[in-house]
Image: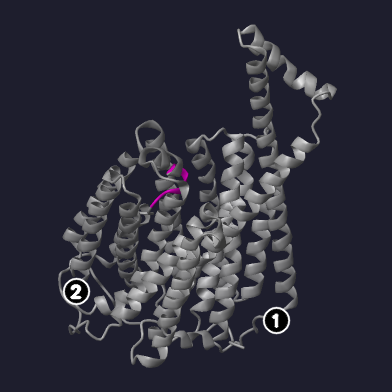
Amino acid sequence: MFENKIFFEWVRKELHLLLLVLLLIPLGFTSGIIGNVAGYMTGSLSAIPADITMASYAHTIGLIAGVPFVLSFKQIITSKNLLLGVFSGLIILNLIIGNTDQPLILVMASFIAGFLKILGLLEVFATLIPILMPKGERYRLYAVYYPVTLIAAQLTTMFMAYMADHINWQFGHFFLMIPLLGGIVLVLIFVHPDFPGEKIPLYNFDWLGLVLMIISMLLLDYVLSYGLTEDWLNSPKIIFGTITCLLTLTLLLSRTYIVRQPLLNFHVLRYKNVRLGLITMFILSLFFAASSVQNNMMNIILKGNAVEITRINMYMIPGFMIATAIGYLYYRNFASFRFMIVFIVFCYTISFIQLYFLTTLNATSRDFYLPMVFRGAATLLSYMAVGIYVANGLPFLEFFSVTVFYLGIRVFIGPAVWTAYLSYFYYHRLIHNINLLASKTEQADPLYVAAYNPAYHQAQSNGQASDQALNTELKIVFNNFQTQAALVTVKETFGMIIVLACLFIMVLLVVKIYQKPAQNDERGFTLI
């Protein structure tokens, strides 16, 4: 494996890994729009949740769009200038996000932040490769990269929620500039300014393909984010967005056959491990998207306490650490993709079964420790397992196209599609359950009288007229109906996810998706 150093010669080789991890941390802190502070943002921006959702996904779209660009961009810029530009740009964008009151600016700033972030991540990632996987041991690379980035993202979420609750959500973005400034200092001191090779102009880059890819993904983001708000295909805006998205995607696909060096090489889908890996990641995205249902449940149980909800999500960090050890030891000795995916889905299933029985107003924060540990372990192992599988045996240049497809499904298409589906299911089942509770309630029922008549008499004793007291009673009844119906809907959604997970495990056990490699097969998998 070639040596790809970015540090000065005087920097000891023993320090390279530590310095690269220190560069990863501020990049990991930059996670775009944090979901748990969305409530604070909608209030201060006079926006709707769909605006914040679109801005959040715009960040992931930026991550995807930057991948095919980075290889060509590296031909005209040094590592020092690239990293300085990335950290400086992210500081400016955090400043913009923290000061804007326009949802459109929020979306575009989030997109550019994601684009810059992936340029920095891939620069550090490429430098980690010769250090951690000199013989192609990708699991060693992932055992460092994913724990650092996932833990950094969790810490950022906790910090942003705390800042939003105690000061304001903008202050969190201002504070993120401090670790980014630390990244600039590290680059100025340790990264050399030399250019590693011959400069190649960018005019051969498929700029139109990049524009088409960005437009198609942003349109898909709009459709999936605003679909429920606009009532899906009953809205002309959603219909127009869907048609335009399909048109731009078709134009992007056509460039594979009419351009000598297209942005994306769709021929990589001929590899069976790539197809199966992408399909597996799309299915696993259901479990990523289920965090929205979990947040609905915790909002009910914890009365919308964003800080406490985020603290519960921090329980995933021990799961990340356990999964790192499991993944490292497993891939050091074995290579069965199917076994690992079955284990991952099993961990998710255990987590959702526990959450199913915790869907009650009597649950406390401590009760969520074990399910969140299982969820954290499954999340990191899913990134590691599918990442190793899809990259197996790929030529270097084709790896970037596969990375675009893999990231596109893992961080955007999969979660966005499943979140839209779960939101649609949750909304309609919630209305159904509220109507069902109302239809089965009789005001003459002794239980109803015992539960709600005291509220009526209390209102009258406070000086309210009879009709006003009745309205007060009915308001309490409706709020209780809504809470109970929401809990029932959450349990139904968890139940559906558990059933789908069990079906997926059965498919994995029955369908042959891989073949054990021969002892002399260095790739680890035989593609069939």
Q: Is residue 58 left or right of residue 334?
A: left
The residue at which mark 1 appears reads as 512
Q: Say which element carries label 2.
A: loop
Q: Is residue 34 magenta?
A: yes
Residue 265: x, y in percent? 42, 85
Which residue is pictured at 30% across the width and 74% down the height? 70
Secondary structure, magenta segment, majority class: helix
Residue interval drawn in magenta: 33-37
Image height of 77 relative to 293, above or below: below
Which residue is pictured at 42% across the width and 87% down the height? 254
Q: Nearer the viewer, residue 316 or 484?
A: 484
The residue at which mark 2 appears reads as 77
Question: In this view of the protein, can residue 325 be seen by the observer?
Answer: no
Residue 97: x, y in percent? 30, 49
At label 1, the amino acid type is Lys
Q: Is residue 322 left or right of residue 397?
A: right
